[in-house]
Every structure is written in C-alpha cells, then in structure tokens.
Amino acid sequence: MKKLQMQKFVGAVLFTSLCAGLVLAQPLEAPSNDPAAVDAVKQVGQEMGKAMMASDIEKLNQIFADDWATVDSSGKIFTKESLLSDFKSASTNSSGLKMDL
C-alpha cells in the first residue's frame, strides 16, 4: 500500500474506532458521566494509535475484535484480518510511517 493511502487508512481506522468506542462506551438509556469509563476508552484509543504507528501486530490483534470491520471512503471493506495484513505488509516494506492527525 502506498504511504499516502496507508496514512489515510490509519486515520480512517483511528477515527472510526474512536467514534465507535465512544458510542459503545455509553449506555443507550443515558449518557455516562463515569470518569473511569471515559478514561478507559481514551486509554484504548491511545494504545491503538501507538500500536498502529509502531506496526505492533500483536497489540492490534488484542485491541480489535475478531469480527471488527469498517468501510473506507471508496466503499472498500476492511476486516481485522485485512487490517493486520496491511500493517504487516507496511512494516516489512517501510522504515516507519509518519503522519499528522
């Protein structure tokens, strides 16, 4: 995957995961003001970002559910398997990714 495509993909995954985490962390009947729940979601988001930047496949495998999937802006579906595969490929084909979020 080209560097720019990978950057866009990582940004989309981070944004989608963060939004989903924030939504799923809230009970449907009422918003949670529990600081521990908010901190837990923030912590997972930070760990995910660090793992993505480091191409830490083991950590990403722990963070993403086996049935996780997202759709990018072009309509392509990414599953956990394809996400991990892309990161494995990127880590072997480049010296690291740098991006501004």
Image (cartoon, grey):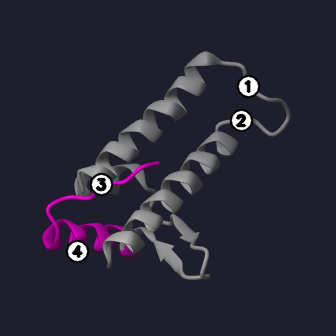
Q: Is residue 50 above or below residue 55?
A: above
- Main SS, magenta region, reads helix
**Left or right: where does residue 51 sit relative to residue 79?**
left
Assign a secondary structure to mark 1: loop
The residue pinned by badge 3 equals 98
Q: Quadrant of residue 87?
A: bottom left
Residue type, label 4: Ser
The residue indicated by pointer 4 is 89
The residue identified by callout 1 is 32
Between 89 and 65, which is closer to the camera in this rendering?
Answer: 89
Q: Quadrant where the N terminus lies?
A: bottom left
Q: Which residues are magenta?
A: 82-101
Q: Nearer the viewer, mark 4 or mark 2?
A: 4
Q: CA distance from mark 3 to mark 2?
A: 32 Å
Q: Residues within 10 Å of mark 3 (few under 14, many from 20)?
A: few
Whole-number angstrom distance, CA of label 1 to CA of label 3: 35 Å
Pointers 2 and 1 in contact (C-beta within 8 Å): yes
Q: Is residue 93 magenta?
A: yes
